[in-house]
Image (tube, coloured by chain):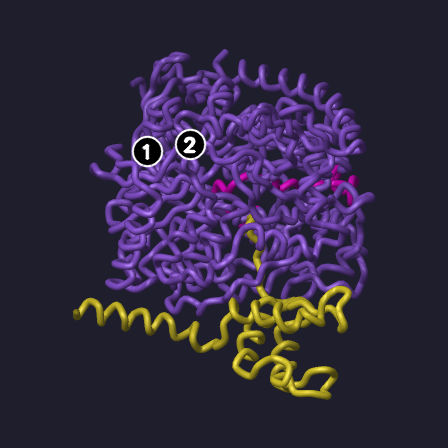
Chain colours: A purple, B yellow
């Protein structure tokens, strides 16, 4: 067996041990909160909010002698509850990582050569402001691109780009969940939470929830599936940990999930198993759907998906019988195919017709909590349209996020106008975008690149100047409302002073803004910002509470059914749940999901499929020394039959080539994947020598992935690449 | 020089659609929060109002009528005349039937 299985066992074993420890800790922590916060000698315990993944779990940092010794879970947060995952614990090593950026640096060699000059903050700010001003003077403010990923301090970076006059902010969603967000928004007017803890029947398409990211909803799934015996049906070309824990696993033919869902809808409607009252009261377009899905029989779907028709029929019946407590779970999976939006729409529609909306065990619209807002001085809107032409090409997409791959195409072509400066915050386009060679070309044509990050990412490695951001344990951030079934407000406060010459993002933005003549828009401190946010929290002495506890949650049980009143208006065009979407039709898209069979790889090639493990999930944590212990290198999963045909042995190096690049990594010959696919994990093969544990180790999927995107949302389609595999 | 003029022409053309809408969403949000929300908030002196309180057509009709406080006063006596267009733009853009795809963070 290869490394993943061994590590998986180790991880689950440690997770089991953690569960026991957590139970003990919970009791301890609860006692602690009853007693109030006290310090023994030099030891302090400071509540804060984790930043190692987007989940934002509450943590309590144990600080001794000015050093973070340990991170504990904070049981007061109903979302993260008493949990801090392996990655959350490893945040300590982000602070004390010898590889991290320790002072501002300006490039002195060629881009990517790795020759840097340490400079003062003033020198770094002056240099960047001069370069940005030169681009602005020569090409206009729209010639600057501002790329960022979600985070509590992202708002300051985005505001700098906008106040500079650029419309070209491009965020991560079209590399992540934009297709999900758009499909559920188009259907329900919002993206709901999934009440996994209370569901009775869950179906997942490729969302490898037990393995790819370990968050509280993973725990809900474990609670729901493993303890309460909710049924889990899982579709994935690969036998993952989730497949191992599922009641039924189907190695579906890649790219055919939509056929499976449409056939389920066909069965449910044909047999009259849909929730008739709910459909009549809250939805629009059911009649068109009933007519539309007549063509999608289970027998037809069997040929597409390779899932037996009798199983599709049975699963559809069981799903409909579970009714309000049945869930087709969207998960956190990114988009894989060019029809991803329509596949998500079909999931949303299937959920709608069984009436699981706003029900215990179903899909629940997110409850929100009030929060104050710091009103900063507003600027004039950027004059130019976006360079990615979102409004023309993707009229229904979230324009403020941009569409990353279309943007890169337009930047490379120089049309509709040139982009010559690129500022990046907390993002690594070198690894998060497919086709790294194209990203490198984009880098080449920039007059200036500035990167703000905690570590020397591959993107930072190719920058002209790097601004070292303080790690989350070293800074105070804006307050965040966590909407959900159990809504909460979380606060991230400084736990230790920065150990290197780093700054929080706000101060980096202010340093640049001052030199760009934009200082008035950022004339506040983080303390003023968070105090304004505390102001509208519905609790007495909110500021004191948040500093003492790090989190506040509305008490009581989740409330279901608030939107289930006949006069409730959904935030859609018709005010109803839109099964048939006029808005999609007006924009030139299919108003109901239409299936088109995916192109299959030629005989000598494989479809490349991707996935994640919870140790790092995203590319930016694989250099963390504690997480690296779990997995040191990625490999290529290949089925024994094609491996034998190609003479590939387990553990031998193979080359994997697509039309855009080639990588070398070890083969893992395993029957846990279909013969028409190969699989590799994300996050290895780094180019930055300051990612020393994973520099040139394994391979980066970004090198071989081809450019493709979902037609409606613009979300990158990550499973559209065919590769050749050969002994290296 | 010719290239620069060409570029400016392209941007001017592409910008026309934006300019035609008039009003600034960013400034409108600021003025709405600063002025309107001082009364129209939970626990405030007047009924809580958010952009979702009306549809796009209803907001447009409201501003076309230009009245405030059940028609007893003009809207531009409450919001400065030069800010009305911005507030209208913000409210219409985020009305209950406006396309508002959700995003991750941000």
Rendered image: mark on residue A245? none
How far, Cα to Cα, is label 1 from label 2?
9 Å
Q: What residue is rendered at 50% in x and 31% in y? A: A611
Does A358 appear in magenta?
A: no
Camera-side residue of B94 and A51: A51
Residue A566 picture location, percent across and down: 80, 63
Residue A261 position by quadrant: top right
Q: Is residue A561 visible to us here? A: yes
- Whether residues under marks 1 and 2 lie with C-beta atoms below 8 angstroms apart, the answer is yes
- Circle 2 sits on which residue? A608
Q: Magenta segment range?
A: A316-343
Q: Up-down: is B78 above or below A319?
A: below
Does A317 appear in magenta?
A: yes
Camera-side residue of A186 and A643: A186
Rate crowding at label 2 as few (under 14), some (14 to 19) or many (20 or more) other CA atoms within 10 Å.
many
Q: Quadrant of the C terminus of chain A?
A: top left
Q: What residue is rendered at 80% in x and 48% in y? A: A559
Label 2 sits on a secondary structure element that is strand
Q: Chain of mark 1?
A: A
Q: Up-down: is A143 above or below B97?
A: above
Q: What residue is rendered at 74% in x and 31% in y? A: A224
- Circle 1 sits on which residue? A658
**Left or right: where does residue B1 sit relative to residue A1?**
left
Q: What residue is rendered at 50% in x and 75% in y? A: B23
């Amino acid at each position: 067996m290869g490394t993943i299985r061994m590590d998986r066992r180790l991880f689950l074993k440690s997770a089991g041990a953690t569960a026991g420890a957590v139970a003990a800790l919970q009791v301890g922590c609860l006692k602690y909160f009853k007693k109030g916060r006290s310090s023994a000698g030099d030891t302090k315990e400071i509540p804060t909010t984790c930043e190692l993944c987007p989940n934002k779990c509450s943590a309590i940092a144990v600080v001794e002698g000015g050093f973070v010794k340990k991170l504990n879970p904070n049981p007061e947060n109903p979302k993260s509850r008493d949990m801090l995952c392996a990655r959350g614990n490893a945040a300590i090593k982000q602070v004390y990582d010898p590889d991290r950026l320790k002072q501002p640096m300006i490039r002195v060699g060629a881009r990517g050569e790795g020759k840097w000059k340490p400079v003062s903050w003033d020198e770094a700010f002056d240099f960047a402001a001069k370069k940005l001003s030169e681009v602005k003077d020569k090409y206009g403010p729209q010639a600057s691109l501002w790329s960022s990923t979600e985070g509590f301090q992202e708002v300051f970076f985005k505001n700098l780009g906008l106040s500079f006059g650029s419309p070209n902010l491009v965020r991560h969603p079209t590399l992540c969940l934009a297709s999900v967000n758009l499909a559920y928004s188009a259907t329900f007017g919002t993206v709901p939470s999934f009440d996994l803890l209370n569901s009775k029947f869950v179906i997942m398409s490729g969302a490898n929830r037990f393995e790819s990211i370990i968050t509280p909803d993973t725990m809900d799934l474990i609670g729901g599936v493993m303890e309460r015996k909710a049924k889990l049906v899982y579709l994935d070309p690969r036998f993952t940990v989730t497949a191992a824990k599922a009641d039924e696993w189907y190695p579906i033919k890649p790219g055919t999930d939509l056929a499976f869902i449409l056939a389920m809808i066909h069965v449910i409607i044909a047999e009259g198993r849909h929730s008739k009252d709910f459909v009549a009261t809250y939805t629009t377009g059911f009649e068109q759907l009933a007519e539309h899905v007549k063509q999608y029989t289970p027998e037809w779907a069997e040929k597409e998906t390779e899932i037996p028709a009798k199983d599709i029929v049975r699963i559809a019946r069981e799903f409909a019988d579970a009714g309000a407590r049945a869930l087709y779970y969207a998960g956190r999976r990114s988009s894989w195919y060019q029809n991803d939006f329509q596949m998500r729409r079909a999931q949303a529609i299937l959920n709608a017709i069984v009436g699981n909306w706003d029900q215990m065990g179903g899909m629940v619209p997110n409850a929100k909590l009030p929060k104050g807002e710091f009103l900063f001085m507003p600027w004039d809107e950027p004059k130019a349209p976006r360079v990615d032409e979102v409004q023309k090409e993707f009229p229904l997409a979230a324009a403020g996020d941009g569409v990353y791959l279309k943007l890169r195409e337009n930047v490379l072509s120089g049309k509709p106008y040139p982009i010559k400066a690129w500022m990046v915050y907390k993002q690594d386009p070198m690894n998060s975008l497919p086709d790294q060679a194209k990203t490198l070309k984009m880098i080449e044509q920039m007059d200036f690149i500035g990167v703000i990050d905690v570590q020397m990412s591959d993107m930072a490695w190719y920058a002209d100047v790097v601004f070292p951001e303080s790690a989350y344990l070293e800074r105070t951030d804006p307050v965040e409302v966590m909407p959900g079934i159990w809504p909460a407000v979380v606060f991230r406060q400084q736990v230790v002073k920065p150990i290197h010459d780093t700054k929080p993002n706000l101060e980096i933005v202010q340093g640049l803004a001052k030199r760009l003549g934009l200082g008035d828009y950022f004339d506040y401190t983080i303390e003023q910002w968070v105090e304004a946010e505390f102001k509208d929290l519905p609790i007495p002495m909110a500021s004191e509470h948040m500093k003492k506890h790090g989190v506040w949650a509305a008490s009581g049980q989740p409330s279901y059914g608030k939107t289930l009143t006949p006069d409730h208006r959904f935030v859609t065009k018709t005010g109803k749940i839109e099964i048939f979407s006029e808005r999609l039709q007006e924009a030139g898209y299919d108003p109901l999901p239409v299936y088109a069979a995916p192109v299959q790889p030629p005989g000598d090639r494989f479809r490349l499929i991707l996935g994640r493990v919870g140790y790092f999930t995203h590319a930016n944590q694989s250099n963390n020394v504690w997480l690296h212990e779990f997995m040191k290198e990625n490999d290529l999963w290949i089925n024994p039959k094609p491996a034998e045909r190609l003479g590939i042995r387990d553990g031998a190096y193979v080359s994997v080539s697509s039309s855009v690049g080639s990588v070398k990594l070890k083969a893992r010959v395993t029957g846990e994947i279909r013969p028409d696919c190969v699989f590799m994990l994300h996050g290895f093969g780094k180019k930055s020598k300051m990612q020393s544990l994973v520099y040139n180790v394994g391979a980066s999927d970004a090198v071989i992935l081809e450019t493709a995107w979902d037609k409606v949302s613009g979300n990158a389609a990550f499973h559209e690449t065919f590769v050749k595999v050969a002994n290296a | 020089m010719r290239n620069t003029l060409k570029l400016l022409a392209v941007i001017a053309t592409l910008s026309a659609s934006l300019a035609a809408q008039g009003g600034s969403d960013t400034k409108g949000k600021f003025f709405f929060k600063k002025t309107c929300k001082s009364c129209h908030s939970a626990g405030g002196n007047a009924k809580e109002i958010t952009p979702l309180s009306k549809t796009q057509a209803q907001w447009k009709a409201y501003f076309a009528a230009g009245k405030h406080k059940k028609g007893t006063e003009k809207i531009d006596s409450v919001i400065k005349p030069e800010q009305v267009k911005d507030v209208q733009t913000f409210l219409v853009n985020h009305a209950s039937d406006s396309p508002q795809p959700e995003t991750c963070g941000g």
